[in-house]
Every structure is written in structure tokens, then in C-alpha cells.
Image (cartoon, coloured by chain):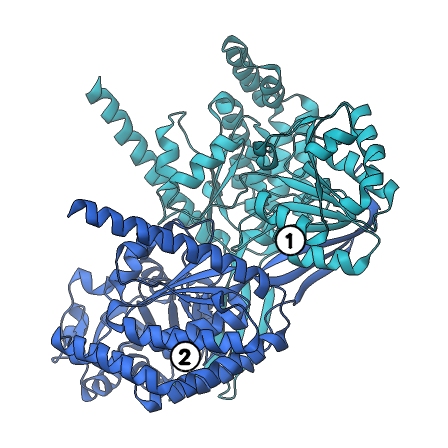
Chain colours: A cyan, B blue
Amino acid sequence: MSAAKSIDISVIEAEMATLGSNARSAAHVLATTTADARRIAIESVADSLAAGYDKIHVANAQDMADARAAKLNAAMLDRLVLDAGRVETMVVGMREVAALNDPLGRVLGEWTRPNGLRIERVSIPIGVIGIIYESRPNVTADAGVLCLMSGNAAILRCGSESFRTSGAIADCLRRGLQAAGLPVNCIQLVPTRERAAVGMLLSMDEDVDIIVPRGGRSLIERVKEDSRIPVLAHLDGICHVYVHAAADVDKARCVTLNAKMRRTGICGAMETLLVDRAALDMLPKILASLHEAGCEVRGDSEVCGIDNQAVAASQVDWDTEYLDAIISVGIVDGLEAAIAHINRHGSHHTDAIISEDHAAAERFLNQVDSAIVVHNASTQFADGGEFGMGAEIGISNGKLHARGPVGVEQLTTYKYKVHGNGQVRP
Amino acid sequence: MSAAKSIDISVIEAEMATLGSNARSAAHVLATTTADARRIAIESVADSLAAGYDKIHVANAQDMADARAAKLNAAMLDRLVLDAGRVETMVVGMREVAALNDPLGRVLGEWTRPNGLRIERVSIPIGVIGIIYESRPNVTADAGVLCLMSGNAAILRCGSESFRTSGAIADCLRRGLQAAGLPVNCIQLVPTRERAAVGMLLSMDEDVDIIVPRGGRSLIERVKEDSRIPVLAHLDGICHVYVHAAADVDKARCVTLNAKMRRTGICGAMETLLVDRAALDMLPKILASLHEAGCEVRGDSEVCGIDNQAVAASQVDWDTEYLDAIISVGIVDGLEAAIAHINRHGSHHTDAIISEDHAAAERFLNQVDSAIVVHNASTQFADGGEFGMGAEIGISNGKLHARGPVGVEQLTTYKYKVHGNGQVRP
């Protein structure tokens, strides 16, 4: 048993090492492609995906049968299923990525030194990106194509429940790459369901430059904990809306309702509402809309005193991402107190102020230490598409490299090109 | 004994935790300062350093006495000693940093969405920067002031041999901060020589946003290995010069000599010379200059056949950063072979091509996967000052966030400011 297990592991290790060196080689080829070549490849990949629907459907039916047998819940089954409509959506999304501005070869800066050296800072691909995701098999296509457009090789590790579906999608993508004359190893799927492969991927710091986990909190926590490679992700989206003394009550009500209830399960959904003591008269109207929409209100003692439908919030509520129709509501004494609460309890993701006082709003935007700070609009705009950046591979609340939505531009780095005519340093 | 030890550790843990929360508080204040306020503070800090020379001198004399008693070698003693001239150099360097362009509040992008949302991407400080360095006590001042100009709070961990000197410098800096009305905790020195404090600093991922190690390979290796916080650094500078078939022989000779011998101990010094087989006739002239300058040549078998002063290189030479008057020299078959060698054996730091063929040079610059790629100039220009960026805190060969020289601009991140008038997401 133990011997058999160790053989399996060494086989997987060898497979993963091959995956890594294949990816690095493909990345070197990709780094020198033109935007046109990458766009043509994406169109080819999209065509191949559309043409491959039958095989994807068969694979998905098998995954679904296993998932039902394993008694996965309805939400998980819904994430897993791929019908013709969803595949069509993936194809359309791919073509949109092909239409984005080329993120590579942008001259980010250029100057000439007194000694005649001309220095250019130019955007280039990061190299090899490892994407680790859970049940939604469409990530295989979406992430693969975002990496392709940004000139990066992708190593995709799907959830075990979508293993066959993701495999069928990856096959289509690779056929499309081949037809376009690019290395098929620009996009590779980890060829095993074994969990050990994840740990191996996270330790391949020679061949993988960045890890992007997509999924629930436990996945992202594990990846952040175990990775020897930099991780772009956010663990939590504990987003706030702060209703300032000078708020317009209707904006406060509409934005709050949208920020909480439009979709409760996304990372940009508001989890905590802070209302300024000087705006306390707006609270009943705001809470009435939330109650009417079916939202549970957990308030501090003052809020519970005002709203008899509210239940008492405990200390842990201020640090909780509900991802559900639940909201914590607190009263704060002024702008500084709101900012202090958010910087202490938030997750540096997306936070909003509602106010007609532009100076107060500017102070909030400057002092709240979050990737996205919003004045008089819903936190649910925290999204690459809504930002006009095209598709996103995720959102980062880290401070290094990329903050906020991570699109093709954020999947690049830069190099300095120094042009001389024989200069030596004195 | 064991009980005493555990008490010490818990005391240090408490001190480090206080340092962290002090730094975070100071960073929040710093983030909202104007460039003028930071410039005035730097001038005040510089004045305070100049005025404090006597105390620094006394502290340095004590450190030097201990260092001599501990039989530190001459190079280490030279790094440790601070005379009036060196302090004056530090003061001048500070005033130069104060004169840099403000790296904060730069609008990196600004656009308006069809729904009227106006989105700005604005540069902001990273937050809290931990700097871990070895014997040179001037880093205390240089790094502290670079952090200050970029709006970051600094936690400085000096080498134990410069503990008193660094402490005296830090006292000056803090007096200068106080005189300028900024929190003294913008710059803090770890108040113990205990090595355990380094491990604690590297685990304070809540309060420290980035770690910059400055020193030898073993320090940087340990920091990269142990840190839970992202690290900006380079482990090696295995830099190459490639003499292409179409090289100008005099440029090749001069650049090679400068790249190797100007200063052998800096990270931008060339370690390996690659000569194209088609440029073999240039080799004797190039090697003659190196020999004349006292450089040991370790060649592959062909090089040794041509140059009877060369010794045979072993496999490990191609992966070695000598930081000394030694060079490995190899013959390569064409541009692609040179690029492949550099991408395999290099450290993604700085690599140069010597060629009059601009198309070949452009291919080299595009395909060599290094932070800095150079055409017809010395690798020793790999330096923030030489790039015109002002002082640098170090050089990064990582791909994320900052590549190449890390100056005040690279010590920033960004946030998105979203300006609305009540927009909700459909």
C-alpha cells in the first residue's frame, strides 16, 4: 500500500515537472508573438470550442452523473453543468478577449540619460501562470484565454468534480492552438485528480511565476498558506457602505440595497453598513428596503433600539463575510470613526461612502486602505468588466503587483531595455 | 535557563508586535501627507543627522571596538566605520531624495464608463516596509528616507555589529521627524540584537506589507525562505555579456572590461562572457584586456585552446556569481544559443549584447528573460541612480510588482477611486 502510494506520487511528480518545463518553453515562444498571432489563436481556440460541444457535453454528463451519485448540493451541480448556452457564452467571451487592446509591448516609460543611454520600460508577459479552481469548468476556457491574450502560458488545475469536462474543454483549446500554429502547451491541464498535485504545483517556483486561486475561502486560504509562489487573490470581500451625514437619503437607500442584495454571493457584495450618527434619521428608510428584500439585519445596540426587526450583532459579525442575505449595521460617530472601522474590520477590497459633501468623500477615498474605494455608487461594481477592463481572472486585495480586478494588463510585468552605443560606467 | 529564554522571547514578541502596530498607525498618517510635508520632514531629518554626528561617532567607535575584538575582517570593518565624510554623504543623499518627483498621487489612468462612473487609478504608498540589512549602518538613513519620501513607514533591522551606530542614526531621524511634526514611528529600528526578532518580523504579515533584504546571499536566501511577506530582492546577479557576430571589437573590449572589472563586487558586474563563434577573432583582444586588468579567465575547452592563460571552466562556473576578478568565458553558436544559455544559467538580472546589427540586438532584448537587457553598454549601469531614478533601495529580479532598480516609485502601489452619483449595478 505504502509502496504503491509512493510510486503514484513519483509518477505525478514527474508529470508535474514535465508540465512545468513544457509551460516554460511555451511561454518563451508566446512572449515573442504579435498581438495578431495571439488574436488569431484565440479565434481558433473559440472555433475549436464551439465545434467540440458534443464531446464536452458527453464529458459533462459523466461528471454530472458522478456528482449526483456523490450527492453534491444543487448549487454545486448548477456550477458544474455546461449546456449549449453556457458553452456559447464561453465562446463569445473568448472573442471579446481577442478584441482587447494588446497588453504587451506597451512602452510604460522612455527616457534618455545624459550619457546617451536610452532606457525603455516595456510591458511583457509574466511567464507561467498556475490557476487553481473549483467546480465551474468554464474557468478552463476563460482563464486559458486571458493567459493567452497576455502572452502567458497557463497551467490549469480544475476541481476534481469537473475533471472530465475541463479535460474536454482543454482538449478543444489545445486543438485550436495547434491549428493556429502556437505551442499546444500554452494551455495545459493538470492530468490527475490527485490532491498531491496541488502541493507540487505550489512548490514549482522555478517554472511557475504566479498562482491565481479561484474558489471558496478554504481553497484560497490553503493556497496562500502553502504556496512558495506569489499568489494573486483575495481571501475575503468584507465590503462596507458608509452613509455620511451629508448623504442623499435616496442614493443611500438605493445603493445600500443594490450593494447588499443584487447578488449576495459575490465578493463585491456589501457585508456591513455603517451609518453616521448625524444621518440616523435615514436609517429606518434604508433598513425598510433591506427588510422588504428579505435581508436579515444584525445591528449594534442602537440599531436594535431603532429597528425592532433587527437582531443583535455579536463582535464576530463585524469581521464576517456573509455572502448571503444578511447584513451587519452599526452607528459611527463621524467620518474618522467610519474610516477607522473599515481599516480595522474590512478586507481592503471595496468600500463606499454615500455623501453629497465632496471634500468628505475625498477624505474617505484617500484614507480607506482598500483596493477599490467608491463615492456614491454600489460596491457591486467591483468587477473587471464593469471597470471596462474586459474579462478578469479574479480580484486581488494584496498590495503588490496588482490591486482590484486582474485582467490581461495585470497579467503582465515589465523589463528595461537599455540602448547604448558603447557606453561604459565611469 | 530555558525559562529565562522563553521570557526573553515573549518580551521580544511583545516589542515586535508594538513596532508593527506603531508602524501601521504611522503609515496611515503618512499616506495622507503632501509631498511638501514629506520633503520638509526629510530636510529636517537630514539636519538632525548632520547635527547628531558626535553621538553617532561615539556609538560607531563602540561598535568598531567590539568589531575589532571580534576580529571582523578588514572589509567588514570598512563597511561598518562611519567618519564625518560618510555622514556628510548620507546627508547629501537625503536632500537628493527630497528633491525627487513625488511618487504619490500620480493618476496612472482615468476613464469614464458609459454609466457615468469615473474611475481613477492613483498611486499610493505600499504601507509598511521591513528592511533587513547587514553591516553598513548608512542603510538606516538611506532606506528610512526612501520610505519616507514614498509615504511608507519603515521598520529597520540592522546587522548586530552596527547596532549602536544604527541606533544613534535612527534616534537622529526620529528627532527630525518630530521636529517636522510627523509621527516618530514613521521610522523604527528593531530594538534588539536577538536573531529571533528577524523571524518574527518575517511573520508579521498583518502589519508589514513588504520585506526588502539588503546584504549577502545567505541573508537574502534566508529571508526569501522564511518570509510570509512578499520579498523584493535579487539573490544573484549572474550577468552576461554576449559578443555577437556583428559586434564592434572595440566596443566589445571596452564594455567587457568595464562590465567585469569596474567594480567586481556589485550585482551588475558581468560574470560570464559569451562570444559568438563568428566573432572568435575578437576573443584574443578582449581577453588580453581582461588579463591585463588582473582578471582570471575560466574558459570552455575552445577558449582554453585559444588562450593559454585561461583555466578550464567546470560546469558549476556557468552558474556562479564570482563577485570577484574572475570570469567564465564560453563560445556559443549564434544568437539563439546565447539567449538559451542566458535564460538557463542567468539570474534574470542584467544581460547585454554587443552588436552593430540592430535587428539581432532587438531579438536579444526581447527574448532574454531578464529585468534589464542592454544593447552596446556595460551591465554595470544596472543601478537606480544610473537609470535616473534617484536612490534605490535595491534591485529586484522577481517578476511581480517591481523589476530592476527599486526606487521611490517602485515603493508605491495603487488604488481605484470610483466617483459616482448614485449608480447601482443592473
Residue B107, placed above or below residue B79 = above
Q: Position of residue B74 (x, y in %)?
A: 17, 81
- Kindly identify the amino acid type of the residue bearing the numbered disc 1: Val
| Residue A125 as seen in the image, left or right of residue B320 | right
Residue shown at 49% from the left, 36% from the top = A220
According to the picture, the residue beneath numbered tag 2 turns out to be B381
Query: Residue A357 at x, y = what percent?
Result: 82, 56
- Name the quadrant of the C terminus of chain A: bottom left
Please tell me whether mark 1 sits on a helix, a strand or a loop: loop
How far apart marks 2 and 1 lie (CA) works out to 39 Å
In which chain is the residue bearing label 2? B
- Of residues A282 and B293, which is closer to you in this image? A282
What residue lies at 25% left-to-right and 22% top-to-bottom?
A: A5
Q: Is residue A39 visible?
A: no
Residue farthest top in this picture: A69
Image-quadrant location for residue B188:
bottom left
- Which residue is depicted at the point 41% across and 68% down? B395
Q: Quadrant location of the N terminus of chain A?
A: top left
Mark 1 lies on residue:
A368
Q: Which mark is residue A395?
A: none
Furthest-bottom residue in view? B85
- Number of residues whose C-alpha sits closer than 10 Å to that of mark 2, classed few (under 14), some (14–19) or many (20 or more): many
Q: Residues within 10 Å of mark 1 (few under 14, many from 20)?
A: many
Numbered disc 2: secondary structure: helix
Residue A359 percent location from the top left of the image: 78, 61
Which amino acid, by three-letter code, is at mark 2?
Answer: Phe
Position above or below: A217 against A106? above
